[in-house]
Amino acid sequence: CYYDGDDYSKGYDQLKTILNKTGRPIVYSCSYPAYEQENSILTDYAYMAENCNLWRNYDDIEDSWNSLTNILDWFAQKQEFISKYAGPGHWNDPDMLLIGNFGLSYTQSQVQMALWAVLAAPLLMSTDLATIKPE
């Protein structure tokens, strides 16, 4: 946090090597591309694909339709460029699924789930499974 952005990627390849030496399967999520966007720095997505399993590209999602549509608009504008770096073992990450929380309607939750699937995004939920609605 509060870094000027000159060297966001420094150390990610080293940490990847250390994590891989554990011999355990670990999903390595790198969030710095989201901060590079804020500082108008062009992200080296080839580096991301080589060193991270997933990477956050844009703002943190909030539990609202407006937040979701802002993220979708960003991905729509950048998809032609960023899609070529995603593939088996490494993915663009538009942030967590809001489904089951209170900020989206059921239909809006369906839209998010469908679009995350189209984006081949990680399907990580931010929901209390003890209180999630059955649908």
Image (spheres, rainbow, N blue to C red):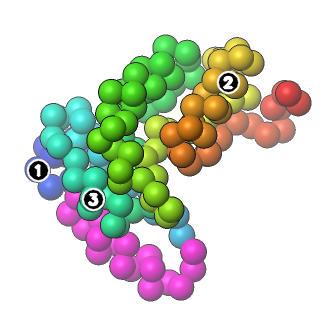
Q: Is residue 14 left or right of residue 26?
A: left
- For residue 112, say whether it is visible: yes
The residue at the point 74 percent across, 18 percent down is 106
Q: Secondary structure at mark 3?
A: helix
Q: Which mark is residue 25?
A: none
Q: Which mark is residue 6?
A: 1
Q: Secondary structure at mark 1?
A: loop
Q: Amino acid at mark 3?
A: Ala
Distance in Å between CA atoms under marks 1 and 2: 37 Å
List the residue tagged with mark 3. Answer: 46
Distance in Å between CA atoms under marks 3 and 2: 31 Å
Q: Quick one: 7 or 52, which is closer to the camera? A: 52
> Which dot, 1 or 2, sits closer to the camera?
2
Q: What span is colored magenta in the figure?
A: 9-25
Q: Say above or below: 77 vs 4.
A: above
Q: Amino acid at mark 2?
A: Ser
Q: Which mark is residue 109?
A: 2
